[in-house]
Image (tube, rainbow, N blue to C red):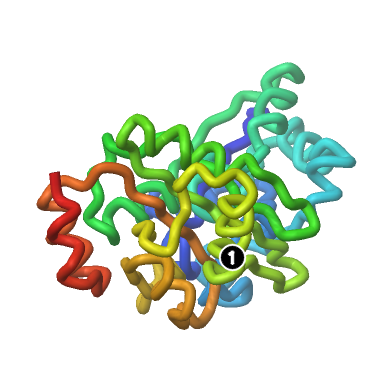
Amino acid sequence: MNELIFIGLGLNDEKGITIKGLEETKSADAVFMELYTSLMPDFSLQRFEALCGKKIQLVSRHDLEEENGTQILQAAKKGKAAFLVPGDPFIATTHVTLRIDAEKQGIKTRIVHGTSIMSAIVSLSGLHNYKFGKTVTVPFPENFSETPYNVIAQNKKLGLHTLCLLDLKAHEKLFLSINQALKMMREVEEKKKQNVITPDTVAVGIARAGGNNPTLKADFIKDLANFDFKEPPFSLIFPGELHFMEVDSLIAFAGAPAEFRRLAK
């Protein structure tokens, strides 16, 4: 059977894969994995291979984007191929192109979902899922863009929260920090002067979501900018209008100051 299964690995280590995902991996004829779209802090390829009893073929961004995933598609034409991806296979990645190419070539595709940063952030922060607006990625300074600032501004006008995914180059061990992202947003504010990102703007920083020891801190930017979030990966939330239960959650779970209570609506 010609088949390509996209399987989510979860967020932190080799135990984050679902039972179904593990079963599909064990029964595959060929197993591929990419680890460049996100950092899984405690993941061990050696332990994962022992867990699933398979030899894993690591693929790079070049293999998928320049070579169009040719080796994966060829394996799927011969039998059952599994492609393992951090998080959920199609959240904040470009792997949909590979799936479309597979279908065009007559290869059946399926998805085994994994824990996503999107759901983990909501669960950790206590913010209401239905109040999140458009998500945006904050790039490294060398790829500077005003888009994140503009998205935050648009969402705030609607009273919505903004999840900012901070850029990374996992294979080079480069990660945009929360402190750097805040500095970049403040620089755009100084230019645009729309009062979107001020010292008194509320933000929530998250490090290692999905791990055993995540760090979550909510504060005003003037104080959050000096907070040490330690190891990556990092995410950042700019809340919109806050319900009193969301404020209570940020105080209880994210160490927000008591002054947050005046922000509740």
The spot of residue 105 in percent (x, y) is: 76, 20
The spot of residue 185 in percent (x, y) is: 57, 55
Give the vertical position of 188 relative to 132 (above or below): below
Q: Name the residue nearer the viewer: 167 or 37.
A: 167
Give the vertical position of 54 relative to 146 (above or below): below
- Packing grade of label 1 (10 A; few <14, some 14-19, many >=20) is some
Q: Name the residue nearer the viewer: 116 or 109.
A: 116
Q: Does residue 42 appear in the picture of this structure?
A: yes
Q: Residue at x 25, y 43 (%)?
A: 241
Q: Residue at x 46, y 82 (%)?
A: 228
Q: In which quarter of the image is residue 15?
A: bottom left
- Furthest-right residue in this view: 67
Q: Name the residue nearer the viewer: 250 or 87.
A: 250
The spot of residue 171 in percent (x, y) is: 75, 67
Give the vertical position of 145 relative to 47 (above or below): above
Q: Residue at x 48, y 60 (%)?
A: 235
Image quarter hosting the C terminus: top left
Q: Is mark 1 on a helix, strand or loop?
A: helix
Image quarter hosting the N terminus: top right
User: Exactly how many numbered labels are in the figure?
Assistant: 1
Residue 188 placement, left or right of 248: right
Q: Does residue 205 appear in the picture of this structure?
A: no
Q: Residue at x 47, y 38 (%)?
A: 153
Residue 148 placement, left or right of 75: left
Residue that label 1 marks: 183
Q: What residue type is labelled 1?
A: Lys
